[in-house]
Amino acid sequence: MAERHRILIIGGGYGGLYAARALARHDVDITLVDRRNHHLFSPLLYQVATGALTPSEIAQPLRLILRRQQNVKVLLAEATGIDPQARTVRIDDGADLEYDSLIVATGTKHSYFGNDGWAEYAPGIKTLEDALQMRARILDAFENAELETDTARQHEWMTFVIVGAGPTGVELAGSLCEIARDTLPRDFRVINTEEALVYLVEGTDRVLPTYPRASSKAAARQLAQLGVTIRTRTMVTDIDEAGVTVRGTEGTETTRLQARTVLWAAGVAVGRFGRAVAEATSAPTDRVGRIRVDDDLTIPGFPDVWVVGDLAAVEWTPGRMVPGVAQGGIQGGRYAARAIIARRDGVTIPGFTYKDLGELATIGRLRAVADFRIVRFSGFPAWFMWLAIHIFWLIGLQNRVLVMMRWAWSFISRGRGSRLITGLPSHSSDREGRGGLG
Amino acid sequence: MAERHRILIIGGGYGGLYAARALARHDVDITLVDRRNHHLFSPLLYQVATGALTPSEIAQPLRLILRRQQNVKVLLAEATGIDPQARTVRIDDGADLEYDSLIVATGTKHSYFGNDGWAEYAPGIKTLEDALQMRARILDAFENAELETDTARQHEWMTFVIVGAGPTGVELAGSLCEIARDTLPRDFRVINTEEALVYLVEGTDRVLPTYPRASSKAAARQLAQLGVTIRTRTMVTDIDEAGVTVRGTEGTETTRLQARTVLWAAGVAVGRFGRAVAEATSAPTDRVGRIRVDDDLTIPGFPDVWVVGDLAAVEWTPGRMVPGVAQGGIQGGRYAARAIIARRDGVTIPGFTYKDLGELATIGRLRAVADFRIVRFSGFPAWFMWLAIHIFWLIGLQNRVLVMMRWAWSFISRGRGSRLITGLPSHSSDREGRGGLG
């Protein structure tokens, strides 16, 4: 009897997890490696950052998701290097894992366009830790405003700048306004949280630049209703502790936005293992380092190495790339699983095609924009659609029920249940443990 | 018109919070200072440490709890010093807060009996951060066992030592056994988690040493049924990365317990502000530094400074101290509130008397011991009583409903919903952010 085909999957996000699940009924040995023990429902990260959901509601242990699938072994480890000739991946405890087929699904991280010093002042939002740090910053800002006696500085604490008006930036801006207007007002005695200012800064000419123009327009209108100040065609030239310096894309004059809280929702970069794979295979990459794969999602010259999800640069229709969203990973992961089995069995299948399911973004409670190509709408119907789809996709029955209950409750009470600041407060003399999670 | 009486409360635990709430209907100005933004339902911390509950379910923002009480102002700050003659408390931004009456309710922390180096290997459990760090350690241990190829080391990863068999140690030991026997077995492919060993080490002659002997006996029997190895009359002489060295209290011979995970549930110490208060008022203290107050809970010679909760050493009946549990803080806080109003109004009230409501400790799912003085029971009835009381006391309607739902679910599924390891895994090259929360 021949040995079972060994499939190694690096990364337990959408691409990696859905590849593993698609292989459930096949007679193969799968090893799934992730440096975190959980799969993250990343489209809802901003809900954790704004206190509407808790970490356990948008994340599930990989072992729990895959416990019934006996052909998968989960390893909590970080992949550090690859030898594509020997067909091995090295993990951080020094062991080499052998594979017959490899699926690389390690995703991307955010980037500060070369200004890594900005990270300290403008946290991004890719992981649970990021989201919780963001939550602590937002809540701390209001706490500090309450303590502040100088009016100008109080104003700075109550001014928020969000950089990048993609779906995450738009969702953050909408939620922040709602926190300030609906959730917090009665909690404070000195400040009036309704006076908080929220700026949304975007380099292109509109919010949601990858969406159809009609959606951008609807989103901009709804954001304005919530009280967000939108600055399109605006580049960030500097960020420090006390604010952001911006410049119009066509001008030379800079403007200063005095704000103690800056949130980063822009830029894409490739992590260490993604870069190691590109280097070891001499794979072609795009401007930010994503790997340009063949139309069967393998690396040119390495038919046993698939790249799926955010890390892959794949054309969808001429000149248009598969977007870095959950659907891109899910469809890529499932395709790679099918292709591996086909290859093993000597069958030929057609190349990967991305099935566009449309776009959707929420703008706070009750507002959203949706574009499903055949139909396009905004406002409450779009928001309701968004809610239904996201609850449906949350993995695990318990989470679905709990998230629904919490949302129902938040909706009735206009409260946000998860407003803990964990780690020590920023004005404490002991700064260790800061940005801790809760 | 006379100025309103200014009451300053340091600490938002049971003592501080219940004092503030007891003053709700009085014409006074209250300032509540805490360095964390939340009140913590500390008797359930071990449930977070063992993945049954999430941080937001056992903690509530102080502002949210007190939002309707217009005579309270909440400040997120750390008290650093006191001038009891000038009647001011200094906070960490340098400001001095004036008071007419002061309530000090900053509680205690755990102590390593002078061996602070043990903290690194044996985390304690006083804060949410502690509980989440403990959760990460427990889950990481099983992950590391799964990765380990050496049998002896695998065994070490699957051995757990809990130091201290008070209620917290007992509850942790019971939960740990349940995790290993009921929750995890199907999640792993290499290790059999049911083979995990849990040691409970205690210096006195029995578990739950402050409880009646009959309760200790019932608890020991139930722990043994769950598979906990109990070592009473046993002192810890050393802790390092690979285990614990213990010695019988009457012997000289030491024994080594090889275990990669050691959890600390022993020792009491007073924090910085508590020590500053004792020093500035030359207050008498007990062996661990708790302040010996008069029978009206004020510091001798300082009739305007009350000390309530854990930080106070108060005799209850001759030779028996008020225990450091939630009820001690609640009753002390309420008494201080009444005493302050009585003093302001020139009325005399009797000294503080502690009303003992009995003792209760759970030992995993369905097991517990209860002693309500007039009636004493163990097993399922005690567990059910424990559940009802704890849910009743959880502050906030949402939490009560959610906690009940999650418990109902855990009970049916034998699962634990909150099994996230956040922060980077311990075997990662980047150790920063370790012990983060989730």
Image: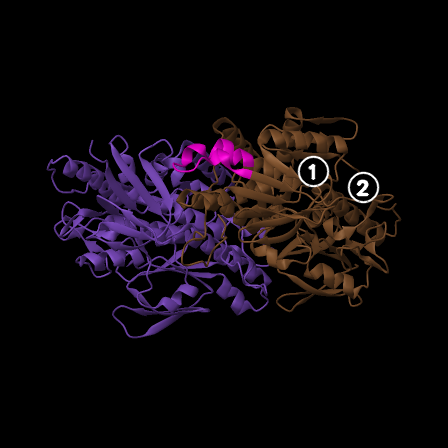
Chain colours: A purple, B brown
Kindly state the secondary structure of the residue where label 2 is placed.
Answer: loop
Q: Are marks 2 and 1 in contact (CB under 8 Å)?
A: no
Disc 1: which residue: B207
User: Magenta segment, principal secondary structure?
Assistant: helix
Task: Identify the residue at horizontal 34%, vertical 36% (top origin).
Answer: A393
Amino acid type of disc 2? Tyr
Residue A31 seen in the figure: yes
Which corner quadrant holds the N terminus of chain A?
A: top left
Residue B203 position by quadrant: top right
Depth check, mark 2 against mark 1: the one in front is: 1
Q: Position of residue B412 (x, y in %)?
A: 50, 26
Task: Identify the residue at horizontal 78%, vertical 49% (top origin).
Answer: B336
- Membership of B299 in magenta stretch: no
Disc 2: which residue: B354
Question: Magenta part of the protein: which range?
Answer: B177-197
Amino acid type of disc 1? Val
- Residue A58 higher or lower than B368, as above or below: below
Tell me the subunit letter for badge 2: B
- Membership of B185 in magenta stretch: yes
